[in-house]
Image (cartoon, grey):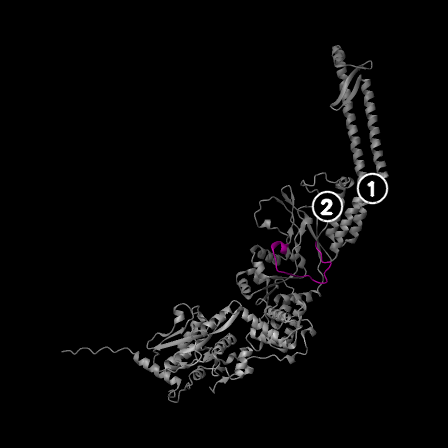
Amino acid sequence: MSKIKELTPKDLRKDCDPSFFKFKTTRELDPFDGAIGQARAIKAMDFGLNIDIKGYNIYIEGPTGIGKTIYAKNKLNELAKKKPVPDDWVYVYNFANDNEPQAINLPAGMGREFTNDMNQFIDTIKNEIRSAFNNQDFEKEKENIQKDVEEKKIRLIDKLNKDAAKQGFEIKNTPSGIYFLPMINGKTLTEDEFNALDEKTRADFEERSVAIQQETIDTMKKIKELETKATEKMNSWQNNIALFAVTIQVNELRNKYKKFAKIQNFLKAIQKDVLTNLNDFIEEEKPSTTPPQMPQAPTSKPWDKYKVNLFVDNSELKGAPVIIDSNPSFYNLFGKLEYENSFGMMKTDFTLIKPGLIHKANGGYIVLQVHDLLTNPILWDSFKRVLRTREIHVDTLKDYQLNTVAIASVKPEPIPVNLKVILIGPSNIYYALLEQDEDFRKLFKVKVEFDEEAPRTDSNIFKIAQFIHNFCEKEKAPHFNSGAVAKVIEYCSRMVENQTKLSTQLNDITELLGEACTWAKMENAKIVTAEYVKKAISERIERINKYDQRLVEMIQNGTIMIDTSGQKVGEINGLSVMHIGDYSFGKPAKITANTYVGKQGIVNIEREVELSGTSHSKGVMILSAYIGEKFAQERPLSLSASLCFEQMYNGVDGDSASSTELYAILSSLSELPIKQNIAVTGSVNQKGEIQPIGGITDKIEGFFNICKLRGLTGDQGILMPYQNIKNLNLNDEVIKAVKDGKFHIYAIKTIDEGIEALTGVPAGKKNKNGEYTIGTVNYLVNEKLKKYAIAGRPTPPPPPPPQF
């Protein structure tokens, strides 16, 4: 045992000295909004945000709960303040094609101003036009035009009546038409009287009626011309009045927005449209007479087309927009057209176009979770199309789905897009998209890798203290003193099983902080101390360690057979880690080995019954290679051996027990018993070198708990890989037992060191003659294999019978 390293309490955990902190409580610290560690990620993020080339969007990958979204938010908010505020966007009516509303961009704040100006314009021209047409001058001119027409009509009709009288006719105008009644001596004849006239007189009347009828037609035509000219004169007069009123208002707007060609065209079209729909402006708006309970058809007025849909309003921004969303539905991202039900027909117009998050983020940044996008194929394809084409259409799902309702829609003009997209998700999705989605590779060329651990430097330790300050301020929780912060730091190292690292799983750290604060509040403490942090850790374990406790009970009562004292040949205590949901714990497992004559090699019983994982099977195969190199250089290896994890029914994987299995085989071959008070973990390579494994802290604490229940004897302990020393983060109870000499932890580098510790017999080395020292483990193993080789030789055939 003197050749191997026995660990001291200082090796078992890297304590954080509270005196390192120059504060009494975290209340004294400044807030911290950056990332803990993540130097590579920060560098990549800075590059991705500073490159303005198409396709250089960003994918942030890393485990959940390490602060990727918070970092992105803080980073973007800081950067966005230095960027210019993007333009506003408005939609207006398209007089050339009413189904294709026009998009107009204006400097930030001017969109709202233009909207207000057009609303004011509508109110003004309505009032101006009505006022102009309701004043005395207009009415007087209107009366003059009408009077002039009436006088001319009267003169024409009087002349017609006189000419008719000269021809012996009276003209009678009735609703059914104009009649010419014959007269004799000033008396109008009845039909009977006319029929009683002689034929010559009647023929004379008929001949004269032709001429008077033609004159009547000519007179009616002249009256119609008079009325038409009067109407034209009235319209011209009205148009002049309206044009005067409108031109003043339009010119003001034209001067104000003279730099914007689309607005100039829009105002020009409005000017024409006002004259076309002048009567709607002149008439007073009447209240609806439809009963309230009856559905009313939506009515539109000409001035509705002059309104402005303030689509994107950036007037309140102080830099580029930063949009972070966790619910990217189709309409939420790409905007939508709202509809109104008009007697079974769904209708919309340019005022009902609503923006999506991409519109609002345009000119800035948008942060989305990749999983949310991929749950909807239409959403993902549409999103990629926006990034590919650099423009966004306000589509409706009717373009992708069948509809049973009639829809009258519009097609708004697309808006150019210039924004940086930051997707957040796990690495497996990143690599799947990289391999299977050709567009993804072209559109997301910057990968930002967040790590779940960071170096345990003074800087990162202080950042965690600042993070604790942030938590306490946000949750209005009691602050932590320096001792409590030190325990949190130690817990962060335990989470990543590395004394030189710190966990960046901020979500898990936050849970610990919240629980420690709760225990402090329950005892009316104003400050969270180290005791409350330790209590939070122990209480959390107690809440979720049901299966751990059941296995301990089964070991304690002998249901699961684990020996912690004595010595046995071919039996050894291995160590495994079990994961139940979010809880993991160490558990000893009895590993047995039987060896006998044969050529099967080492049989992995778990593999034979399909309970062995690939890593475990590989580890077992390595054992044959080690034994072959060490003991079969001069003769074939004749060995059959079986290995078994006793009472293990849920499968075995990993190679962390390969050294343990090799010790059991060597014990069986040498017939030297192994100490059962020592448990073992560690993988081995073909050269007999011990390799590091995972879960070392849980494994040691698991075996320690069994020994503690049965009573610590002072000779119990663990054999572990030397390389795993930096991974130890053991609890106070184990450290105290080691300090008191009641429990021992040994770090080894080779199989020879391990077998010596387990058997108390030297492993043995070859002398100059290539032979192992008599009595050593390797000597005994070699001798047994010699016997197996002899016993395994084929029996020579009997000699042939004598010939006579």
Report whether 620 appears left or right of 59.
Answer: left
Nearer-the-camera pick, 448 or 107:
448
Residue 174 falls within the magenta-colored stretch: no
User: Is residue 338 depicted above or below 448 in this figure?
Assistant: above
Label 1: how many residues lie within 10 Å, few (<14), some (14-19) or many (20+)?
Answer: some
Residue for point 54% across, 63% down: 429
The residue that label 1 is drawn on is 132
270 vs 217, nearest the viewer:
270
594 is higher (above) or lower (below) than 367: below
Q: Are marks 1 and 2 in contact (CB under 8 Å)?
A: no
Q: Is residue 263 above or below residue 457?
A: above
| Separation of residues labelled 1 and 2 (CA atoms) | 21 Å
Q: Is residue 33 visible?
A: no
Q: Percent position (x, y) of residue 89?
A: 70, 55
Circle nearer the N terminus (1, 2):
1
Compared with residue 232, is residue 692 higher up or lower down, i.e. above or below?
Answer: below
Q: Residue 327 in magenta? A: yes
Circle 1: element type: helix
Please name the residue shown 82% across and 18% down the image: 166
Q: Nearer the viewer, residue 261 or 545?
A: 545
Q: What residue occupies the far left of the structure in this picture?
A: 804
The spot of residue 222 in percent (x, y) is: 79, 28
Q: Which residues are magenta?
A: 311-334
Q: Secondary structure at mark 2?
A: helix
Residue 606 appears in the rendering: yes
Q: Residues within 10 Å of mark 2 (few under 14, many from 20)?
A: few
**Residue 17 is drawn in which quadrant?**
bottom right
The residue indicated by pointer 2 is: 304
Kind of residue indicated by mark 2: Asp
| Position of the C terminus by quadrant | bottom left
Q: Position of residue 564 (x, y in %)?
A: 44, 79
Amino acid tagged 1: Ala
